[in-house]
Image (spheres, rainbow, N blue to C red):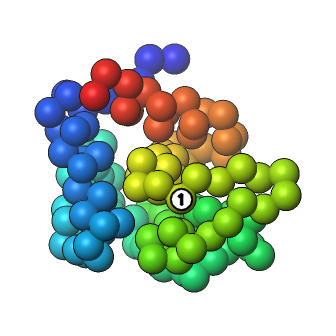
Amino acid sequence: MRMLLPDVKLRRRIRELPSTLYNDCQYPDFNEALRLFAEFYKVAVPAVEWYEYLDDRKTLGLTWYEGVNGKLELSHPENWRKMKASPGKPFCPTCACWVGTLLHEFYHVLHFVEEETKADRCAGQFVTGL
C-alpha cells in the first residue's frame, strides 16, 4: 500500500511545530501542526485531551473514534519527561519519541487503523527522508 504524504517541506514543519510544545509549552504551534496535518488529509482536526499518564503508565497515547472527528488522548510533555520505563515496555522520554507517538496516534484517527503495525508504518514513512 502506497501512502499519500505531504511534501518534505510540510512534513518538516509538521514535525518541528510540536517540539515547541514539548520544549516550551507553546500550544499555538502544536495546534498549528495538527491543523496543517488535518488540512492536508482533508479531515477535521481531532480534539486533544491531556493526561498525566494513561492506563497505569503503560500507554503513551490513545485514540477514540467519535463520529466524524476522532479524539486523541496524549500524555502531556511535562509528564512524558518524568515517566520511566515499565517492565516489558521500553520508553525513551525524548522530544522525537513524543512527536513520533503524536504522529502514530494521528494516523489511528486518520485511517481508523486499529492495527498498531499499520500506524507505526505510517508514522515511520512520514519522517523518512527528513
The answer to which of 7 and 98 lies nearer the viewer is 98
Left of 3 or right of it: where is 93? right
Residue 62 in the image: above or below residue 43: below
The answer to which of 62 and 24 lies nearer the viewer is 24
User: Which residue corresponds to the image point at 48% horizontal and 31% vertical from the top-left?
Assistant: 124
**Mark 1 neighbour density, 10 Å: few (under 14) some (14–19) many (20 or more):** some
Q: Which amino acid does label 1 sit on?
A: Pro
Q: What residue is disc 1 on?
A: 93
User: x, y (%) of residue 114?
Assistant: 67, 46
User: Which quarter of the rendered picture does the C terminus lie within?
Assistant: top left
User: Which residue corresponds to the image point at 31% horizontal and 67% vertical from the top-left?
Assistant: 23
Q: Which residue lies furthest to the top in this view?
A: 1
User: Which residue corresponds to the image point at 66% horizontal and 34% vertical from the top-left?
Assistant: 117
Please tell me in which quadrant of the rendered image residue 102 appears.
bottom left
Residue 53 in the image: above or below residue 5: below
Please tell me in which quadrant of the rendered image residue 5 appears.
top left
Number of numbered discs: 1
Residue 25 in the image: above or below residue 64: below
Mark 1 secondary-structure assignment: loop
* Residue 13 visible, this orientation: yes
User: x, y (%) of residue 86?
Assistant: 78, 62
The answer to which of 22 and 6 lies nearer the viewer is 22
User: x, y (%) of residue 8?
Assistant: 20, 28
User: Which residue corresponds to the image point at 44% horizontal and 71% vertical from the top-left?
Assistant: 77
* Residue 65 visible, this orientation: no
Residue 11 in the image: above or below residue 47: above
Left of 44 or right of it: where is 85? right
